[in-house]
Amino acid sequence: MKHVDDPEKELGSTPYITSTRGVKIMVWPELDRDNSEPESSVYLYEYFIKIVNESQGTLQLMSRQWKIVDGMNRVEDVEGDGVIGHQPVLSPGESFSYSSYCPLRTPSGVMSGSFRMRDKNENLFDAEIGEFYLKDHMMIN
């Protein structure tokens, strides 16, 4: 796994961006060529996420929900508490970055989802994560 403290500064490419109620979510997906095994139909995608609290209040990320669709239209739904073992609390203007993996059985796919957020008044809402493509940008189309 590549270590990236601030994907916005370090990855350089244009991220996928979605904003919901003052929560900006940026995603940078890339194929992990070193750990993928195309001959065994294993394509490992690493995705880098940066969550920015652009609202006026403190927010906490409570859980995540992902919909993963591979190139054969097989769908996998993933849900869980927090992200990578954390339920970060973000004051206005703060951000949280992390990376994770998504294994696919096909060379390409699509992910989308949401983060369940809690505001200072204990209200819950879903910060949407728009569709982003998992495909090797080095592949010839």
Image: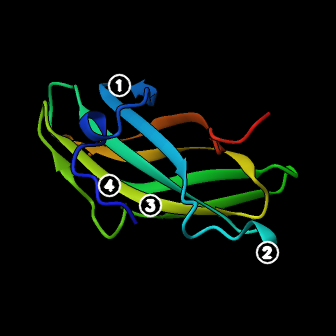
Q: CA distance from mark 2 to mark 1?
A: 42 Å
Q: Provide residue 97's location: percent of width, then percent of height.
A: 28, 49
Counting residues from the start of the chain, the first of labels 1 and 4 encountered is: 1
Q: CA distance from mark 4 to mark 3?
A: 7 Å
User: Closer to the camera: disc 1 or disc 3?
Assistant: 3
Q: Which mark is residue 21?
A: 1
Q: Provide residue 8's location: percent of width, then percent of height.
A: 29, 34
Is label 4 in a helix, a strand or a loop? strand
Task: Tell me the residue that label 3 is attached to.
Answer: 100
Q: Residues within 10 Å of mark 1 (few under 14, many from 20)?
A: few
Q: Up-down: is 28 above or below 36?
A: above
Q: Residues within 10 Å of mark 3 (few under 14, many from 20)?
A: some
User: Closer to the camera: disc 2 or disc 3?
Assistant: 2
Q: What residue appears at the point 75 percent right and 37 percent down from the top-left corner? A: 140
Counting residues from the start of the chain, the first of labels 1 and 3 encountered is: 1
Cβ–Cβ under 8 Å for marks 4 and 3: yes
User: Closer to the camera: disc 1 or disc 4?
Assistant: 4
- Amino acid type at mark 2: Ser
Task: Tell me the residue that label 2 is attached to.
Answer: 40
User: Closer to the camera: disc 2 or disc 1?
Assistant: 2
Cβ–Cβ under 8 Å for marks 2 and 4: no
Q: Is residue 91 left or right of residue 122?
A: left
User: Closer to the camera: disc 2 or disc 4?
Assistant: 2
- Amino acid type at mark 3: Ser
Q: Residues within 10 Å of mark 4 (few under 14, many from 20)?
A: some
Task: Tell me the residue that label 4 is attached to.
Answer: 98
Q: CA distance from mark 2 to mark 3?
A: 21 Å
